[in-house]
Image: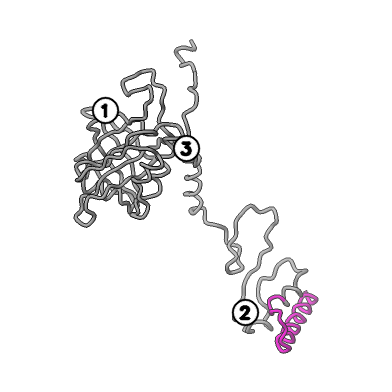
Amino acid sequence: MSSCRRVLGLSAEHALLLLRNGANRSVNHAAAEAASGLRSMTTVPPTLRGMKTPQGLLQPRRYFRASSSSSQNFNNDNDTTTPTPPATQLPHQFRNLMRRLTHSVVVCTSTNSSATLASQPCAMTMSSFTSLALHPSPAVSFNVATPSRTLDAIASSRLFNIHVLVADASGAKVANWCRQGNAGTLQLFARLRDECQCEVTVGNDDAHPALLQGPGVLHVLKCRLLDEPSGGLVKVRNHVIVLGEVLEILDGGHGGSSSPQEEGRKDMGLSYADRKYRHPGKSISYQTPEEEK
């Protein structure tokens, strides 16, 4: 114990000499050199308390020697060993889990009927589209993060089109362009004509949402918002769940060999998983418990 005190006393005197002589090393560094053989130091020695350093006054602080085999992440902003709170890891873990699931990819279009935007057509790619019911009429849903120009258009016109895309390069190309957003400088619908060879029909009013037909588009669902609940728009945190009713199904103009009525259809809808567009793979054959008996 006495030898420890002598070492610490020497480190303090050495630090004072460095400061007086204008040395470039800080007191913290000098003290660390002198105490490098110690396993831990629970407090700042009395001879160093209140001493001014480039970082400010030295304060009592507990230092820990982290194990090299530790798998925790540490925040070194204040030279402490505070692990990352588990609560911040849960959203990251959940996102990675959801990437392992396959999601459908569709393009939604609508037209904003507000006076300030003068019936501006909008489009967005989404992977949350799903069916809800068949009777008394088909119902669908999806969710949109706010703010969103396309969501504003749906809310103002109450009409939208869902474009089911083909699981090939042409469908992925349409989806990728519609991911870019609706900024005026992008000229999205002109790009869809020029880059994707889609036929784009844009109505003169909000009663006719933009319609895409051609390569990459399998079918188009013409929809309107459900009246219930909450007028078809349900806010959940920073997203809005859209509830719609299917009014009509149109051919997408892709030129495939299938239609919604065909049982043995070959063309499949575009899907997304692990940050890549995908084509559904082969089917899995299995026996039910009744068949195994």
Label disc, if present, on residue 104 of the rendered structure: none
Given residues 152 and 86, the one toward you in this image is 152
Q: Position of residue 167 (x, y in %)?
A: 43, 31
Circle 1 residue:
134
Q: From the viewer's perspective, is residue 173 above or below residue 112?
A: above
Element carrying mark 1: loop
Q: CA distance from mark 3 to mark 2?
A: 56 Å
Circle 2 residue:
58
Closer to the observer: label 2 or label 1? 1
Q: Give the amino acid type for the residue marked by disc 3 in the picture.
A: Tyr
Given residues 195 and 292, the one toward you in this image is 195
Considering only order in the chain, which callout, 2 or 3, is on the residue closer to the N terminus?
Answer: 2
Q: Give the amino acid type for the residue marked by disc 2 in the picture.
A: Leu
Q: Most extreme residue toward the right, as rendered?
A: 3
What span is in magenta? 1-29
Given residues 178 and 243, the one toward you in this image is 178
How many tags in the picture?
A: 3
Circle 3 residue:
277
Considering only order in the chain, which callout, 1 or 2, is on the residue closer to the N terminus?
Answer: 2
Direction from residue 203 to residue 162 in the image, left or right: right
Q: Give the amino acid type for the residue marked by disc 1 in the picture.
A: Leu
Closer to the observer: label 3 or label 2? 3
- Which quadrant holds residue 195? top left
Closer to the observer: label 3 or label 1? 3
